[in-house]
Image (tube, rainbow, N blue to C red):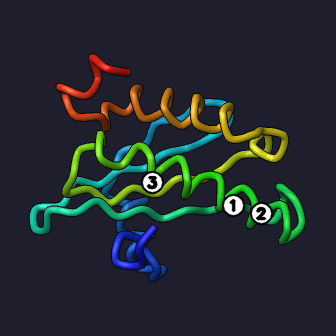
Amino acid sequence: MNRKYSLRKNEEFQNVFKKGKSVANRQFVVYQLVKEEGTSIRFGLSVSKKIGNAVMRNRIKRLMKEVLRELSPELQQNRDIVIIARKPTSDMDYQQMKKSLNHVMKVGKLFNKRSQSKL
């Protein structure tokens, strides 16, 4: 995932938390904020220290980035999205993570209308 497509500053995260809407399943919490300006989608990933050591947290973030890289063309643009991983993600492999993120994104209505028929 390119750096220009990521949220990096604390104030960007806080803005999404305060003004955005959230949806969740057992593995992930997704906050989304529709932006007026800009056409690209930006992601922020958060994995708590409660989930595991640094190796485990980085592994979860790498898997999440790969899933998002695959799903991002089908997602609605002009949004800031923050994804928070919960404890069950430590035991998930790539396919399970993809299925879970796909589910929570559908619940949050983040997919484009025409791409939902393919999924």
Q: x, y (%) of residue 94?
A: 68, 41
Kindly identify the residue that appears in the image at 38 percent across and 21 percent down: 119
Q: Do the residues bearing badges 1 and 2 touch, measured as CB atoms within 8 Å? A: yes
Residue located beneath label 2 in the image: 57
**Is residue 45 left or right of 15 when viewed as pictured?**
right
Residues at marks 3 and 1, CA–CA distance in whole angstroms: 18 Å
Give the crowd class for mark 3: few <14, some 14-19, many >=20 residues within 10 Å.
few
Residue 92 vs 53, above or below: the answer is: above
Give the crowd class for mark 2: few <14, some 14-19, many >=20 residues within 10 Å.
some
Secondary structure at numbered mark 3 = helix
Residues at marks 3 and 2, CA–CA distance in whole angstroms: 18 Å
Kindly identify the residue that appears in the image at 55 percent across and 44 percent down: 29
Task: Give the quadrant of residue 3.
Answer: bottom left
Kindly identify the residue that appears in the image at 65 percent across and 38 percent down: 97
Amino acid type assigned to the residue bearing label 2 in the image: Arg
Q: Earlier in the sequence, mark 3 or mark 2?
A: 2
Secondary structure at numbered mark 2 = helix
Q: Nearer the viewer, residue 60 or 85?
A: 60
Q: x, y (%) of residue 111?
A: 29, 34
Give the crowd class for mark 1: few <14, some 14-19, many >=20 residues within 10 Å.
many
Amino acid type assigned to the residue bearing label 3 in the image: Arg
Q: Nearer the viewer, residue 110 or 18?
A: 110
